[in-house]
Image: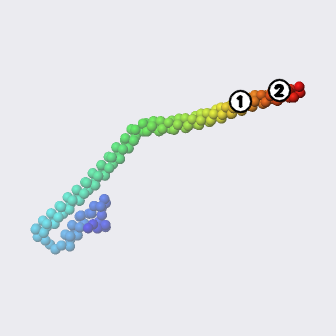
Amino acid sequence: MRDPEREVGYGITDSWDEIVETLLGAPVSSHTELGGYMREFETRFRQDMDEIYTRLDDEQTERQLLAGRLNMLFRDRRAHAYTRQLMETEARMSREAWVRATDASDLVHGEVMSLRTTVLDHRRSTKTSELRTALQGQVTALQGQVTTLQA
């Protein structure tokens, strides 16, 4: 378990303090005990160094990845600007095409209404001509009857 007061940074514990405290509080020891302390010290030292190097490698790898991404974005900035310009041009042209299509639709609608009016006028004039012809026929017949009655 790690003691937060002895944290050096990056979650690494200062092993020296623990070893010194152990040695200072311990009675004079034999070579066997001292050898055990030294092996423990060496083991902890190697573990801590491995942890330090692992974390440094991880940080360096992450920095290299970020630097690579930044360099790629920097190299591609012209392509991104060109893509943005193409997208804006496409959007503008799409809006213009929509306006033209709407205008054409309105124009066609007006033409259709005009043709409907023309067709209705033609139908009315045809109907009027037919009615006039029928009425003239009736007037002629009535005139013939009036002439007959007068004679």
At a point 23% along the width and 59% down the height, the residue shown is: 48
Residue 126 marker: 1
Mark 1 or 2, nearer chain start: 1
Percent position of residue 129, x then y? 74, 29
Q: Nearer the viewer, residue 58 or 16?
A: 58
Crowding at dot 1, Cα within 10 Å, few <14 / some 14-19 / many 20+, comes out as few
Name which quarter of the figure residue 1 lies in.
bottom left
- Name the image colouring: rainbow
Q: Is residue 85 left or right of residue 107?
A: left
- Asked which secondary structure carries label 1, the reply is helix
Nearer to us of marks 1 and 2 is: 2
Percent position of residue 39, x then y? 15, 63
Q: Where does the C terminus fall, quadrant-wise?
A: top right
Crowding at dot 2, Cα within 10 Å, few <14 / some 14-19 / many 20+, comes out as few
Residue 125 in view of the camera: no
Residue 144 marker: 2
Spatial CA span between label 1 and label 2: 27 Å
At a point 53% along the width and 35% down the height, the residue shown is: 93
Q: Amino acid at mark 2?
A: Gly
At a point 24% along the width and 64% down the height, the residue shown is: 15
